[in-house]
């Protein structure tokens, strides 16, 4: 099988080194003009003139990282299989799209807002309550394009330092540690999960990853598998995906489901959900987010929701 790889950096190199013993061949498509894969065929195409050449040489295409033009992947997908699909590429490189999808799938996230000016950044910080983390909506990685606001008055300086026209603003999470789960989904939908890892960062860059994560409770692994499974299936994802999560004192969520193990009958209470938050405003947001995933759940109404 001939595999095309969008990108020709160290990740593409590692991908090819794993594939050669499996009798795969690789063609790298470099749009930077500075490939570093150091093996296989490399097509350097800064102006997009040789994409048809790549398509003619391969049976299917993948990519080495998410910061690539979605339109290139979509163009290729019209003629050859592209895994993971272009939609996955589009979602994972846009934090707003990513957080929106997570909410639709019931994957917990911090409360967030979008800011497109220093003024709206300050307003978001005031609404969420500081500290908050502001991040560029696209193109950020390894802690770049981010700033922590300790007070709303930090907005002007943070806006200037990030230098991006659209930011996502997240309420700061008091977490015990960052953990991640890796999963694989095949073309036929078969899934496999790896043990979770504990990640340690320094200055925004991952320095150490310990797997399996020490002292990991069983329900945390189960929750993480459920979240990433929902994401893989929704995207019809084929390939390897990592989901990074914060483990808090309550686990991976401020929310916990209690089931009573009772038989079903109309009107019978079968369980309840405990929702924790740091403020009434955050509580309203979390309850509404949770309620949308409970079939038949009535709209949340209280004096809090009227504020």
Image (cartoon, rainbow, N blue to C red):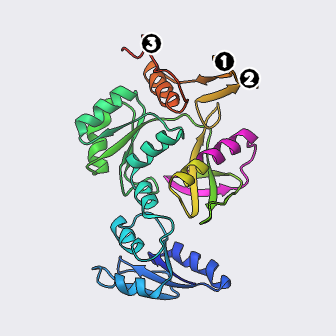
Would residue 150 appear left or right of 3 to someone viewing this image? left
Q: Is residue 210 magenta?
A: yes
SS for tag 1? loop
Disc 3 crowd, CA 10 A, few/some/many (<14, 14-19, 20+):
few
Q: Which residues are magenta?
A: 201-227
Residue holding disc 1: 269
**Which of the two labelled residues, at mark 2 and mark 1, occupies the earlier sequence position?**
2
Residue at 37%, 87% (x, y): give it: 53
Q: Nearer the viewer, mark 3 or mark 2?
A: 2
Residue holding disc 2: 260
Where residue 261 sits, quadrant-wise, is top right
Q: CA distance from mark 3 to mark 2?
A: 26 Å
| Tags 2 and 1 touching, CB below 8 Å | yes
Q: Is residue 251 magenta?
A: no
SS for tag 3? loop
Residue at 49%, 28% (x, y): give it: 286
- Residue 12 rendering spot, x and y as whole percentages: 52, 75
Residue at 28%, 44% (x, y): give it: 159
């Amino acid at each position: 099988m001939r595999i095309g790889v969008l990108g020709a950096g160290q990740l593409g190199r590692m991908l090819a080194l794993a594939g050669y013993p499996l009798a795969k061949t690789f063609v790298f498509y470099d749009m930077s003009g500075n490939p570093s894969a150091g093996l296989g065929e490399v097509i350097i195409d800064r102006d997009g003139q040789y994409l048809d050449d790549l398509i003619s040489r391969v049976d299917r295409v993948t990519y080495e990282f998410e910061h690539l033009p979605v339109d290139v992947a979509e163009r290729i997908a019209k003629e050859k299989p592209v895994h993971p699909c272009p939609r996955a590429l589009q979602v994972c490189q846009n934090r707003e799209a990513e957080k929106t999808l997570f909410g639709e799938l019931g994957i917990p996230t911090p409360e967030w807002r979008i800011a497109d000016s220093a003024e709206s950044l300050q307003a978001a910080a005031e609404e969420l309550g500081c500290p908050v983390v502001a991040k560029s909506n696209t193109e950020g990685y390894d802690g770049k394009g981010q700033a922590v606001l300790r007070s709303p008055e930090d907005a002007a300086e943070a806006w200037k330092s990030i230098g991006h026209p659209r930011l996502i603003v997240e309420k700061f999470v008091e977490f015990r540690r960052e953990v991640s789960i890796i999963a694989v989904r095949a073309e036929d939908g078969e899934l496999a999960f790896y043990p979770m890892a504990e990640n340690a960062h320094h200055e925004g860059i991952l320095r150490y990853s310990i797997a399996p994560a020490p002292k990991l409770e069983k329900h945390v692994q189960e929750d993480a598998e459920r979240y990433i499974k929902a994401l893989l299936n929704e995207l019809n994802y084929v390939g390897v995906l990592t989901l990074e999560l914060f483990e808090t004192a309550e686990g991976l969520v401020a929310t916990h489901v209690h089931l009573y193990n009772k038989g079903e009958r109309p009107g019978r209470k079968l369980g309840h959900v405990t929702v924790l938050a740091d403020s009434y405003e955050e509580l309203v947001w979390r309850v509404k987010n949770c309620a949308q995933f409970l079939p038949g759940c009535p709209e949340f109404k209280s004096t809090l929701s009227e504020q």
